[in-house]
Amino acid sequence: MPRRLGASLRVVAAAAVLVVSIGAGTAVAAPPPPPNPSDDQLDSTRAKANAQATQVGRLTNQVAQAEARLMELQADVELKMEDANKALVDLQTAQDAAAQARADADAAKAEAANAATAISDARKNLDEFAAGSYKQGTAIGSMSAYIGAKSPEDLLARAELLNAVGGSQLDALDSMEVARTAKANKDSAARAALALAKEKETQARSAKVAADAATAAAQQAQQDGVAETQRVEAQKSSAESQLIAAQSAVSGLESQRDRYQAWLAAKQREDALKAQQAAEGNGGGGGGGRPVAAPSSGSARSVINRALSQLGVPYAWGGGNAHGPTRGIRDGGVADLYGDYDKIGFDCSGLMIYAFAAAGYRLPHYSGYQAHAGRRVPLSQKAPGDMLFWATGGRIHHVALYIGDGQMVEAPHSGSRVRVVSVRYGGIVPYATRLL
Protein backbone atom coordinates (compact mmCIF):
# COMPACT_ATOMS: atom_id res chain seq x y z
CA MET A 1 0.00 0.00 0.00
CA PRO A 2 2.79 2.53 0.80
CA ARG A 3 4.47 1.61 -2.51
CA ARG A 4 1.23 2.36 -4.43
CA LEU A 5 0.77 5.69 -2.60
CA GLY A 6 4.32 6.71 -3.39
CA ALA A 7 3.75 6.04 -7.07
CA SER A 8 0.50 8.11 -7.01
CA LEU A 9 2.23 11.12 -5.49
CA ARG A 10 4.70 11.22 -8.37
CA VAL A 11 1.90 11.53 -10.97
CA VAL A 12 1.31 15.02 -12.38
CA ALA A 13 -2.23 15.09 -13.79
CA ALA A 14 -5.47 17.04 -14.02
CA ALA A 15 -8.59 15.37 -15.35
CA ALA A 16 -6.88 13.50 -18.17
CA VAL A 17 -5.70 9.96 -18.08
CA LEU A 18 -1.99 9.66 -17.34
CA VAL A 19 0.13 6.71 -18.17
CA VAL A 20 3.59 6.33 -16.70
CA SER A 21 6.13 3.76 -17.73
CA ILE A 22 7.49 1.77 -14.87
CA GLY A 23 9.08 -1.55 -14.26
CA ALA A 24 7.58 -3.95 -11.82
CA GLY A 25 5.87 -1.11 -9.91
CA THR A 26 3.79 0.36 -12.78
CA ALA A 27 0.97 2.67 -11.59
CA VAL A 28 -1.56 4.97 -13.34
CA ALA A 29 -3.26 7.49 -11.07
CA ALA A 30 -5.83 10.32 -11.22
CA PRO A 31 -5.38 13.42 -9.01
CA PRO A 32 -7.08 13.60 -5.62
CA PRO A 33 -10.85 14.19 -5.88
CA PRO A 34 -11.99 17.85 -5.92
CA PRO A 35 -14.97 19.00 -3.80
CA ASN A 36 -18.26 17.49 -4.92
CA PRO A 37 -21.27 19.77 -4.11
CA SER A 38 -24.38 17.96 -2.99
CA ASP A 39 -27.54 17.90 -5.04
CA ASP A 40 -29.27 19.99 -2.39
CA GLN A 41 -26.60 22.68 -2.69
CA LEU A 42 -26.96 22.74 -6.46
CA ASP A 43 -30.76 22.79 -6.33
CA SER A 44 -30.77 25.61 -3.78
CA THR A 45 -28.43 27.86 -5.76
CA ARG A 46 -30.28 27.09 -8.99
CA ALA A 47 -33.59 28.00 -7.35
CA LYS A 48 -32.11 31.32 -6.20
CA ALA A 49 -30.77 32.01 -9.68
CA ASN A 50 -34.11 31.09 -11.26
CA ALA A 51 -35.96 33.37 -8.85
CA GLN A 52 -33.59 36.20 -9.65
CA ALA A 53 -33.96 35.51 -13.36
CA THR A 54 -37.74 35.74 -12.94
CA GLN A 55 -37.29 39.09 -11.22
CA VAL A 56 -35.05 40.31 -14.02
CA GLY A 57 -37.60 39.11 -16.56
CA ARG A 58 -40.38 40.97 -14.75
CA LEU A 59 -38.32 44.16 -14.59
CA THR A 60 -37.30 43.75 -18.22
CA ASN A 61 -40.97 43.64 -19.12
CA GLN A 62 -41.58 46.75 -17.01
CA VAL A 63 -38.74 48.53 -18.77
CA ALA A 64 -40.20 47.55 -22.15
CA GLN A 65 -43.62 48.83 -21.06
CA ALA A 66 -42.12 52.04 -19.69
CA GLU A 67 -40.19 52.60 -22.89
CA ALA A 68 -43.29 51.91 -24.97
CA ARG A 69 -45.17 54.45 -22.89
CA LEU A 70 -42.25 56.83 -23.29
CA MET A 71 -42.47 56.49 -27.05
CA GLU A 72 -46.21 57.20 -26.88
CA LEU A 73 -45.52 60.29 -24.78
CA GLN A 74 -42.82 61.38 -27.22
CA ALA A 75 -45.26 61.00 -30.10
CA ASP A 76 -47.82 63.02 -28.13
CA VAL A 77 -45.25 65.75 -27.54
CA GLU A 78 -44.50 65.89 -31.25
CA LEU A 79 -48.19 66.18 -32.11
CA LYS A 80 -48.73 68.89 -29.48
CA MET A 81 -45.75 70.80 -30.85
CA GLU A 82 -47.30 70.66 -34.31
CA ASP A 83 -50.58 71.96 -32.82
CA ALA A 84 -48.67 74.83 -31.23
CA ASN A 85 -47.04 75.61 -34.57
CA LYS A 86 -50.46 75.60 -36.24
CA ALA A 87 -51.84 77.96 -33.58
CA LEU A 88 -48.86 80.24 -34.12
CA VAL A 89 -49.52 80.35 -37.88
CA ASP A 90 -53.23 81.00 -37.26
CA LEU A 91 -52.35 83.79 -34.83
CA GLN A 92 -50.12 85.45 -37.41
CA THR A 93 -52.88 85.15 -40.01
CA ALA A 94 -55.42 86.68 -37.63
CA GLN A 95 -53.04 89.50 -36.74
CA ASP A 96 -52.52 90.23 -40.43
CA ALA A 97 -56.31 90.27 -40.92
CA ALA A 98 -56.71 92.60 -37.95
CA ALA A 99 -54.04 94.93 -39.35
CA GLN A 100 -55.83 94.97 -42.71
CA ALA A 101 -59.16 95.62 -40.97
CA ARG A 102 -57.61 98.56 -39.09
CA ALA A 103 -56.29 99.92 -42.38
CA ASP A 104 -59.73 99.52 -43.93
CA ALA A 105 -61.25 101.24 -40.90
CA ASP A 106 -58.82 104.14 -41.26
CA ALA A 107 -59.70 104.43 -44.95
CA ALA A 108 -63.41 104.33 -44.12
CA LYS A 109 -62.85 106.97 -41.46
CA ALA A 110 -61.23 109.25 -44.04
CA GLU A 111 -64.09 108.63 -46.47
CA ALA A 112 -66.57 109.30 -43.67
CA ALA A 113 -64.81 112.61 -42.98
CA ASN A 114 -65.17 113.52 -46.66
CA ALA A 115 -68.80 112.50 -46.47
CA ALA A 116 -69.26 114.73 -43.39
CA THR A 117 -67.78 117.65 -45.35
CA ALA A 118 -70.23 116.96 -48.17
CA ILE A 119 -73.06 116.89 -45.64
CA SER A 120 -71.93 120.24 -44.21
CA ASP A 121 -71.79 121.79 -47.68
CA ALA A 122 -75.20 120.43 -48.56
CA ARG A 123 -76.67 121.72 -45.30
CA LYS A 124 -75.13 125.16 -45.95
CA ASN A 125 -76.71 125.32 -49.41
CA LEU A 126 -80.02 124.16 -48.01
CA ASP A 127 -79.87 126.80 -45.27
CA GLU A 128 -79.17 129.51 -47.84
CA PHE A 129 -82.13 128.34 -49.88
CA ALA A 130 -84.37 128.34 -46.81
CA ALA A 131 -83.22 131.84 -45.87
CA GLY A 132 -83.89 133.10 -49.39
CA SER A 133 -87.35 131.59 -49.39
CA TYR A 134 -88.08 133.20 -46.02
CA LYS A 135 -87.04 136.63 -47.28
CA GLN A 136 -89.27 136.22 -50.33
CA GLY A 137 -92.14 134.96 -48.27
CA THR A 138 -91.93 131.40 -49.53
CA ALA A 139 -94.37 130.98 -52.44
CA ILE A 140 -95.34 134.67 -52.54
CA GLY A 141 -91.73 135.69 -52.56
CA SER A 142 -91.21 133.33 -55.43
CA MET A 143 -94.14 134.83 -57.30
CA SER A 144 -92.67 138.28 -56.76
CA ALA A 145 -89.86 137.26 -59.05
CA TYR A 146 -92.34 137.32 -61.94
CA ILE A 147 -93.58 140.81 -61.17
CA GLY A 148 -91.80 143.48 -63.06
CA ALA A 149 -91.00 141.31 -66.05
CA LYS A 150 -90.67 143.65 -68.99
CA SER A 151 -91.47 141.18 -71.73
CA PRO A 152 -92.76 137.63 -72.21
CA GLU A 153 -89.18 136.49 -72.88
CA ASP A 154 -88.06 138.02 -69.57
CA LEU A 155 -90.89 136.23 -67.79
CA LEU A 156 -89.90 132.85 -69.27
CA ALA A 157 -86.27 133.42 -68.33
CA ARG A 158 -87.24 134.22 -64.73
CA ALA A 159 -89.38 131.04 -64.57
CA GLU A 160 -86.50 128.90 -65.82
CA LEU A 161 -84.18 130.48 -63.24
CA LEU A 162 -86.58 129.67 -60.41
CA ASN A 163 -86.90 126.10 -61.65
CA ALA A 164 -83.12 125.76 -61.84
CA VAL A 165 -82.63 127.15 -58.33
CA GLY A 166 -85.31 124.90 -56.89
CA GLY A 167 -83.80 121.78 -58.56
CA SER A 168 -80.28 122.48 -57.34
CA GLN A 169 -81.48 122.88 -53.79
CA LEU A 170 -83.39 119.61 -54.04
CA ASP A 171 -80.20 117.99 -55.38
CA ALA A 172 -78.31 119.41 -52.41
CA LEU A 173 -80.84 117.86 -50.05
CA ASP A 174 -80.59 114.47 -51.82
CA SER A 175 -76.78 114.65 -51.76
CA MET A 176 -76.85 115.31 -48.05
CA GLU A 177 -79.02 112.25 -47.43
CA VAL A 178 -76.86 110.07 -49.71
CA ALA A 179 -73.70 111.28 -47.95
CA ARG A 180 -75.22 110.52 -44.56
CA THR A 181 -76.17 107.00 -45.68
CA ALA A 182 -72.72 106.33 -47.20
CA LYS A 183 -71.00 107.52 -44.03
CA ALA A 184 -73.18 105.31 -41.87
CA ASN A 185 -72.54 102.28 -44.13
CA LYS A 186 -68.78 102.80 -44.17
CA ASP A 187 -68.66 103.28 -40.40
CA SER A 188 -70.70 100.11 -39.91
CA ALA A 189 -68.58 98.05 -42.33
CA ALA A 190 -65.35 99.25 -40.77
CA ARG A 191 -66.58 98.44 -37.27
CA ALA A 192 -67.76 94.98 -38.37
CA ALA A 193 -64.46 94.14 -40.12
CA LEU A 194 -62.42 95.32 -37.16
CA ALA A 195 -64.60 93.43 -34.68
CA LEU A 196 -64.30 90.21 -36.73
CA ALA A 197 -60.53 90.56 -37.01
CA LYS A 198 -60.21 91.20 -33.27
CA GLU A 199 -62.39 88.17 -32.56
CA LYS A 200 -60.20 85.94 -34.74
CA GLU A 201 -57.09 87.37 -33.15
CA THR A 202 -58.50 86.65 -29.67
CA GLN A 203 -59.43 83.10 -30.71
CA ALA A 204 -55.97 82.55 -32.19
CA ARG A 205 -54.30 83.81 -29.01
CA SER A 206 -56.48 81.49 -26.95
CA ALA A 207 -55.60 78.58 -29.25
CA LYS A 208 -51.90 79.41 -28.92
CA VAL A 209 -52.16 79.56 -25.12
CA ALA A 210 -54.03 76.25 -25.07
CA ALA A 211 -51.52 74.65 -27.45
CA ASP A 212 -48.59 75.89 -25.37
CA ALA A 213 -50.22 74.54 -22.22
CA ALA A 214 -50.86 71.18 -23.91
CA THR A 215 -47.26 71.08 -25.14
CA ALA A 216 -45.94 71.89 -21.66
CA ALA A 217 -48.15 69.18 -20.15
CA ALA A 218 -47.00 66.66 -22.75
CA GLN A 219 -43.36 67.59 -22.17
CA GLN A 220 -43.81 67.23 -18.40
CA ALA A 221 -45.44 63.83 -18.88
CA GLN A 222 -42.59 62.83 -21.16
CA GLN A 223 -40.02 63.94 -18.58
CA ASP A 224 -41.90 62.02 -15.88
CA GLY A 225 -41.87 59.02 -18.21
CA VAL A 226 -38.11 59.35 -18.61
CA ALA A 227 -37.70 59.43 -14.82
CA GLU A 228 -39.93 56.38 -14.39
CA THR A 229 -38.07 54.51 -17.12
CA GLN A 230 -34.73 55.35 -15.52
CA ARG A 231 -36.03 54.19 -12.12
CA VAL A 232 -37.18 50.85 -13.50
CA GLU A 233 -33.94 50.45 -15.47
CA ALA A 234 -31.98 51.07 -12.24
CA GLN A 235 -34.01 48.35 -10.52
CA LYS A 236 -33.41 46.07 -13.47
CA SER A 237 -29.68 46.78 -13.38
CA SER A 238 -29.58 45.94 -9.66
CA ALA A 239 -31.55 42.75 -10.22
CA GLU A 240 -29.25 41.78 -13.09
CA SER A 241 -26.23 42.24 -10.82
CA GLN A 242 -27.85 39.97 -8.28
CA LEU A 243 -28.67 37.50 -11.03
CA ILE A 244 -25.04 37.48 -12.17
CA ALA A 245 -23.96 36.81 -8.60
CA ALA A 246 -26.51 34.01 -8.27
CA GLN A 247 -25.52 32.54 -11.61
CA SER A 248 -21.89 32.75 -10.60
CA ALA A 249 -22.69 30.79 -7.46
CA VAL A 250 -24.47 28.19 -9.55
CA SER A 251 -21.65 28.20 -12.04
CA GLY A 252 -19.11 27.77 -9.26
CA LEU A 253 -20.89 24.77 -7.80
CA GLU A 254 -21.55 23.30 -11.24
CA SER A 255 -17.90 23.82 -12.09
CA GLN A 256 -16.93 21.94 -8.94
CA ARG A 257 -19.37 19.20 -9.88
CA ASP A 258 -17.91 19.11 -13.42
CA ARG A 259 -14.38 18.85 -12.06
CA TYR A 260 -15.45 16.07 -9.77
CA GLN A 261 -17.17 14.27 -12.65
CA ALA A 262 -14.02 14.72 -14.75
CA TRP A 263 -11.93 13.29 -11.92
CA LEU A 264 -14.36 10.40 -11.54
CA ALA A 265 -14.25 9.70 -15.27
CA ALA A 266 -10.49 9.79 -15.18
CA LYS A 267 -10.50 7.41 -12.23
CA GLN A 268 -12.79 5.05 -14.09
CA ARG A 269 -10.55 5.17 -17.13
CA GLU A 270 -7.59 4.51 -14.84
CA ASP A 271 -9.30 1.43 -13.49
CA ALA A 272 -10.14 0.27 -17.03
CA LEU A 273 -6.58 0.82 -18.15
CA LYS A 274 -5.31 -1.19 -15.23
CA ALA A 275 -7.34 -4.12 -16.43
CA GLN A 276 -5.84 -3.85 -19.91
CA GLN A 277 -2.32 -2.83 -18.89
CA ALA A 278 -0.86 -6.26 -18.71
CA ALA A 279 -2.14 -7.23 -22.15
CA GLU A 280 -1.81 -3.96 -24.09
CA GLY A 281 0.77 -1.85 -22.30
CA ASN A 282 -0.46 1.46 -23.78
CA GLY A 283 -3.60 3.45 -24.55
CA GLY A 284 -4.87 6.06 -26.98
CA GLY A 285 -7.47 8.57 -27.47
CA GLY A 286 -8.77 11.10 -29.86
CA GLY A 287 -10.92 14.09 -30.09
CA GLY A 288 -12.73 16.33 -32.48
CA GLY A 289 -14.26 19.74 -32.79
CA ARG A 290 -17.55 21.15 -33.96
CA PRO A 291 -17.36 23.40 -37.01
CA VAL A 292 -18.13 27.02 -36.30
CA ALA A 293 -20.64 28.68 -38.59
CA ALA A 294 -19.25 31.48 -40.65
CA PRO A 295 -20.82 34.87 -40.11
CA SER A 296 -23.51 35.87 -42.57
CA SER A 297 -22.55 38.17 -45.39
CA GLY A 298 -24.25 40.42 -47.93
CA SER A 299 -25.64 43.92 -48.04
CA ALA A 300 -28.10 43.32 -45.18
CA ARG A 301 -25.25 42.27 -42.88
CA SER A 302 -23.17 45.29 -43.93
CA VAL A 303 -26.09 47.63 -43.19
CA ILE A 304 -26.73 46.01 -39.80
CA ASN A 305 -23.04 46.05 -38.86
CA ARG A 306 -22.77 49.70 -39.82
CA ALA A 307 -25.70 50.56 -37.55
CA LEU A 308 -24.35 48.42 -34.71
CA SER A 309 -21.00 50.20 -34.96
CA GLN A 310 -22.72 53.29 -33.53
CA LEU A 311 -24.03 51.69 -30.32
CA GLY A 312 -23.75 54.14 -27.44
CA VAL A 313 -23.63 57.24 -29.66
CA PRO A 314 -25.89 59.98 -28.18
CA TYR A 315 -29.30 60.78 -29.64
CA ALA A 316 -29.33 64.21 -31.30
CA TRP A 317 -32.51 65.42 -33.01
CA GLY A 318 -31.75 66.21 -36.65
CA GLY A 319 -28.31 64.57 -36.37
CA GLY A 320 -26.63 62.02 -38.62
CA ASN A 321 -25.82 61.64 -42.31
CA ALA A 322 -24.22 59.09 -44.64
CA HIS A 323 -20.79 59.80 -43.14
CA GLY A 324 -21.66 59.45 -39.45
CA PRO A 325 -23.07 61.37 -36.48
CA THR A 326 -23.49 65.15 -36.78
CA ARG A 327 -24.53 68.00 -34.53
CA GLY A 328 -28.26 68.08 -33.72
CA ILE A 329 -30.58 71.03 -34.37
CA ARG A 330 -33.10 72.99 -32.33
CA ASP A 331 -36.75 71.96 -32.27
CA GLY A 332 -38.11 74.55 -29.85
CA GLY A 333 -39.24 71.80 -27.47
CA VAL A 334 -38.06 68.54 -25.94
CA ALA A 335 -34.87 68.25 -28.00
CA ASP A 336 -33.82 71.71 -26.82
CA LEU A 337 -34.47 70.74 -23.19
CA TYR A 338 -31.96 67.90 -23.61
CA GLY A 339 -29.48 70.13 -25.46
CA ASP A 340 -29.60 68.04 -28.66
CA TYR A 341 -28.45 71.09 -30.63
CA ASP A 342 -25.14 70.86 -28.75
CA LYS A 343 -24.62 67.09 -29.18
CA ILE A 344 -22.98 65.02 -31.91
CA GLY A 345 -25.16 62.03 -32.67
CA PHE A 346 -28.09 60.55 -34.59
CA ASP A 347 -31.85 60.77 -34.57
CA CYS A 348 -33.86 57.74 -35.71
CA SER A 349 -33.91 58.55 -39.43
CA GLY A 350 -30.33 59.84 -39.37
CA LEU A 351 -29.15 56.42 -38.14
CA MET A 352 -30.95 54.76 -41.08
CA ILE A 353 -29.24 57.16 -43.50
CA TYR A 354 -25.85 56.16 -42.12
CA ALA A 355 -26.62 52.41 -42.01
CA PHE A 356 -27.99 52.09 -45.56
CA ALA A 357 -25.13 54.13 -46.99
CA ALA A 358 -23.15 50.91 -46.52
CA ALA A 359 -25.25 49.38 -49.32
CA GLY A 360 -25.16 52.48 -51.53
CA TYR A 361 -28.60 53.85 -50.64
CA ARG A 362 -29.32 57.54 -50.09
CA LEU A 363 -32.31 58.01 -47.81
CA PRO A 364 -34.17 61.24 -46.95
CA HIS A 365 -33.86 62.56 -43.40
CA TYR A 366 -37.52 61.93 -42.56
CA SER A 367 -38.98 58.66 -41.31
CA GLY A 368 -42.27 59.27 -43.15
CA TYR A 369 -40.46 59.31 -46.50
CA GLN A 370 -38.19 56.40 -45.54
CA ALA A 371 -41.30 54.25 -45.09
CA HIS A 372 -41.90 54.62 -48.86
CA ALA A 373 -38.26 54.15 -49.87
CA GLY A 374 -38.57 50.42 -50.61
CA ARG A 375 -40.97 47.50 -50.94
CA ARG A 376 -43.47 46.94 -48.16
CA VAL A 377 -43.75 43.44 -46.70
CA PRO A 378 -46.11 42.18 -43.98
CA LEU A 379 -44.70 42.69 -40.50
CA SER A 380 -44.87 38.93 -39.92
CA GLN A 381 -42.41 38.46 -42.82
CA LYS A 382 -39.82 40.97 -41.59
CA ALA A 383 -36.19 40.00 -42.17
CA PRO A 384 -32.85 41.34 -40.94
CA GLY A 385 -32.11 44.61 -42.73
CA ASP A 386 -35.77 45.70 -42.95
CA MET A 387 -36.91 49.03 -41.52
CA LEU A 388 -39.70 49.08 -38.91
CA PHE A 389 -41.92 52.11 -38.28
CA TRP A 390 -44.19 53.47 -35.54
CA ALA A 391 -47.10 55.87 -36.01
CA THR A 392 -49.66 57.82 -34.03
CA GLY A 393 -52.92 58.82 -35.65
CA GLY A 394 -51.62 57.47 -38.96
CA ARG A 395 -48.56 59.75 -38.87
CA ILE A 396 -45.16 58.00 -38.78
CA HIS A 397 -42.77 59.40 -36.20
CA HIS A 398 -40.10 56.71 -35.56
CA VAL A 399 -38.00 54.18 -37.47
CA ALA A 400 -35.66 51.35 -36.39
CA LEU A 401 -33.61 48.64 -38.13
CA TYR A 402 -34.57 45.00 -37.62
CA ILE A 403 -31.49 42.83 -36.98
CA GLY A 404 -33.14 39.43 -36.41
CA ASP A 405 -34.15 37.24 -33.43
CA GLY A 406 -36.82 39.75 -32.40
CA GLN A 407 -34.20 42.51 -31.93
CA MET A 408 -33.74 45.92 -33.50
CA VAL A 409 -31.22 48.76 -33.37
CA GLU A 410 -32.50 52.32 -32.98
CA ALA A 411 -31.78 55.88 -31.93
CA PRO A 412 -34.81 56.12 -29.61
CA HIS A 413 -35.33 59.64 -28.26
CA SER A 414 -33.69 62.70 -26.70
CA GLY A 415 -31.63 61.86 -23.65
CA SER A 416 -30.86 58.32 -24.86
CA ARG A 417 -28.22 56.61 -26.99
CA VAL A 418 -28.14 54.25 -29.95
CA ARG A 419 -29.06 50.80 -28.61
CA VAL A 420 -30.29 47.28 -29.36
CA VAL A 421 -33.67 46.31 -27.87
CA SER A 422 -36.49 43.86 -28.45
CA VAL A 423 -39.01 44.92 -31.08
CA ARG A 424 -41.83 47.01 -29.56
CA TYR A 425 -45.20 46.18 -31.04
CA GLY A 426 -47.20 48.98 -29.44
CA GLY A 427 -47.93 51.56 -32.16
CA ILE A 428 -45.91 49.68 -34.80
CA VAL A 429 -47.21 49.89 -38.38
CA PRO A 430 -48.33 46.56 -39.91
CA TYR A 431 -45.54 46.39 -42.48
CA ALA A 432 -41.77 46.55 -42.83
CA THR A 433 -39.96 48.45 -45.59
CA ARG A 434 -37.41 46.36 -47.49
CA LEU A 435 -34.65 47.90 -49.59
CA LEU A 436 -32.21 44.96 -49.70
Image (cartoon, helix red, strand yellow):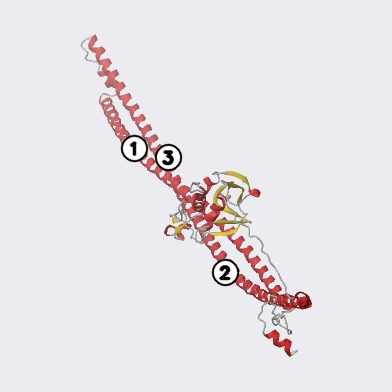
Question: Residue tagged by mark 1?
Answer: 107
The residue labelled by disc 3 is: 192
- 158 to the left or right of 202: left
- Residue that label 2 marks: 234
| Residue 320 position within the rendered picture, expressed as x and y whole percent measured from the top left | 46, 53
Which residue is situated farthest in the bottom direction here? Answer: 2
Q: Under tag 2, what secondary structure?
A: helix
Q: Amino acid at mark 2?
A: Ala
Few, some or many residues within 10 Å of mark 2 (<14, 14–19, 20+)? some
Question: Left or right of 186: which side holds 42?
Answer: right
Specify which label sits upstream in the sequence, 3 or 1: 1
Q: Residue furthest top?
A: 152
> In front here: 310 or 86?
310
Amino acid tagged 3: Ala
User: Can you give x and y, in whole percent of width and height, for residue 167 in the image?
Assistant: 31, 21
Disc 3 element: helix
